[in-house]
Image: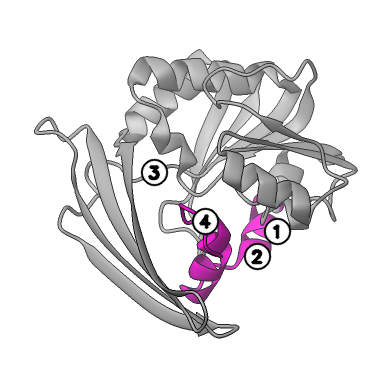
Amino acid sequence: MYGNDSSEVYELLHRARGKDFGAEAAEVAQLIDDRLPGASSLLDIACGTGAHLASFRERYDHVEGLELSDAMLSLARSRLPSVPFTQGDMRDFDLGRRFDSAVCLFGSIGYVDSADELDATLHCFARHLTPGGVLVVEPWWTPEAFTPGHVAGDVFTIDGTTIARVSHASLASPSQEASRMQVHYVVAHPDKGVRHFSEDHVCRLFGQDQYEAAFIRAGFDMERVDSSLSARGFLVGVRK
């Protein structure tokens, strides 16, 4: 719990803030199964620590994860040793096989840097899906929904360790095309003392029309689905 980033406290923080990884995985799986009954394989892109995959593997015969972060990937492999994981960038990867379904959750799609990169990313996703395969993306905020100046803070204690997290959201550029979230953590341990570290996350603010056009160009029929678990809803594509 004393690494140089938030990977080891990632799940604890989000669970403490009310995130239910199991319920989200069940909702996403239902979106897939409604469109492709009998789907048996799933690729989790930007899978993080494997929190959603832990539930997906109970539902599908074969699951895999793709993750760029070394620290996240190490935790995912420790958690799910029987699941294949690959280190890779969502914008350009080649696993050499196709899946019935793929997911990219928790706003991770926002980390692509431009509309051209969004196109490349969705084309890459499409190449890893069978015809009729289902893609579920949880988008980042749109420009209209993003709130510059938003501040959040949480403090919790678990197993004798106290973790505090505060964040501030702002626009990353005057053109309002990207958001910046500055996050600071303080971790206090009875034996190891107090440590502070920070992270800076820049995510692109794509509009709904940009997402829809990119899905179509990548060969998907797409719809947006509201969710009681995600304020941003889900973008669901079926590969033609």
Report the magenta residues as a range: 1-29
Q: CA distance from mark 3 to mark 1?
A: 20 Å
What amino acid does circle 1 point to? Answer: Ala
Q: Which residue is mark 1?
A: 26
Q: Splitting the image into 4 quarters, where does residue 238 fall?
A: top right
Q: Earlier in the sequence, mark 3 or mark 2?
A: 2
Element type at marker 4?
loop
Residue 22 is inside the magenta segment: yes
Q: Earlier in the sequence, mark 3 or mark 1?
A: 1
What amino acid does circle 2 point to? Answer: Ala
Residue 153 is inside the magenta segment: no
Element type at marker 3?
loop
Badge nearest the viewer, 2 or 4: 4
What amino acid does circle 4 point to? Answer: Gly
On residue 140, the disc is 3
What amino acid does circle 3 point to? Answer: Trp
Q: CA distance from mark 3 to mark 2?
A: 19 Å
Q: Which residue is mark 4?
A: 3
Residues at discs 3 and 1 in contact (Cβ within 8 Å): no
* Residue occupying the point 65% across, 65% down: 23
Q: Which residue is mark 2?
A: 23
Residues at discs 1 and 2 in contact (Cβ within 8 Å): yes
Badge nearest the viewer, 3 or 4: 4
Residues at discs 3 and 2 in contact (Cβ within 8 Å): no
Location of residue 230 with respect to 237 vertically, above or below: below
Tell me if I can see residue 39 in this picture: no
